[in-house]
Image (cartoon, helix red, strand yellow):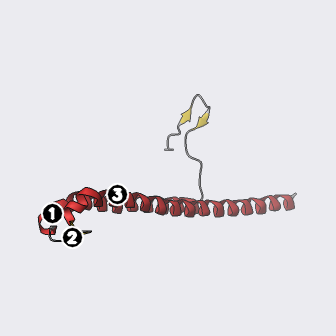
Amino acid sequence: MAAPRFFDSIAQTSLEPPPVSRAMAAAHRRYWRFNVMLISVLMLIGFAVSFVVPLFARSLSSVRVAGFRLPFYVGAQGAILVYLLLIVIYIAAMTRADLRLRQAADADAVSDAASGTAKDTAKDAAR
């Protein structure tokens, strides 16, 4: 049994994504696996700053940062600085991941164009 095909009756086109090469499919899998892993790690760090540090506030009160007790510092400004740092890390990491995906797409387009040119040459030779 064939998979159902979805059709947009207004635009008169198929709603299925265009076929991609194996190399591009692998590049997309790597990209999304990296994205999910990065988000998971950054969310775990955010959770630790938001909930774990306050849970141990009494035992961490002897630690001082910039002259303030650590729980006060984290509550007053440290947590906000950590959240901003997490955002910057996410932006930088995803910019690099986007660049890698774009390079993979460009390499795939070049290989498709080269194989398309070879096919055209073979067709011309057959004539």
Residue drawn at (43%, 60%), measured in percent from left and top? Answer: 88
Q: Residues within 10 Å of mark 1 (few under 14, many from 20)?
A: some
Amino acid at circle 2: Arg
Q: How many marks?
A: 3
Inspect this view and state whether residue 52 appears: no
Front one among 3 and 109: 109
Q: Give the spatial CA distance, label 2 vs label 1.
A: 12 Å
Mark 1 and mark 3: span between their CA atoms? 19 Å
Instruction: Give the image location of residue 32, x and y in percent.
Output: 46, 58
SS class, disc 1:
helix
| Element assignment for label 2 | strand
Labelled pair 3, 2 in contact (Cβ < 8 Å): no
Q: Which quadrant of the figure has residue 118?
A: bottom right
Please report the residue visible at 69 percent of the width from the left and 64 percent of the height from the top.
111
Instruction: Check the picture and name the quadrant holding the C terminus.
Output: bottom right
> According to the image, label 2 marks what residue?
64
* Disc on res. 83: 3
Residue farthest toward the left in the current orientation of the protein: 58
Horizontally, residue 6 falls left or right of residue 120, namely: left
Looking at the image, is mark 3 or mark 2 earlier in the sequence? 2
Quadrant location of residue 46?
Answer: bottom left
Cα separation between marks 3 and 2: 20 Å
Question: Which amino acid, by three-letter code, is at mark 3?
Answer: Tyr
Of the numbered discs 2 and 1, the one sitting upstream in the chain is: 1
Dot 1 corresponds to which residue? 57
Query: Horizontally, is 113 left or right of 73 in the view?
Result: right
Q: For the residue labelled by badge 3, is the local secondary structure a helix, a strand or a loop?
A: helix
Q: Counting other residues with Cα less than 10 Å from the Cα at mark 3, is it few (<14), some (14-19), or many (20 or more)?
A: some
Residue at the spot 24% in from the left edge and 62% down from the top edge: 73
Residue 54, placed above or below residue 65? above
Residue closer to the observer: 49 or 77:
77
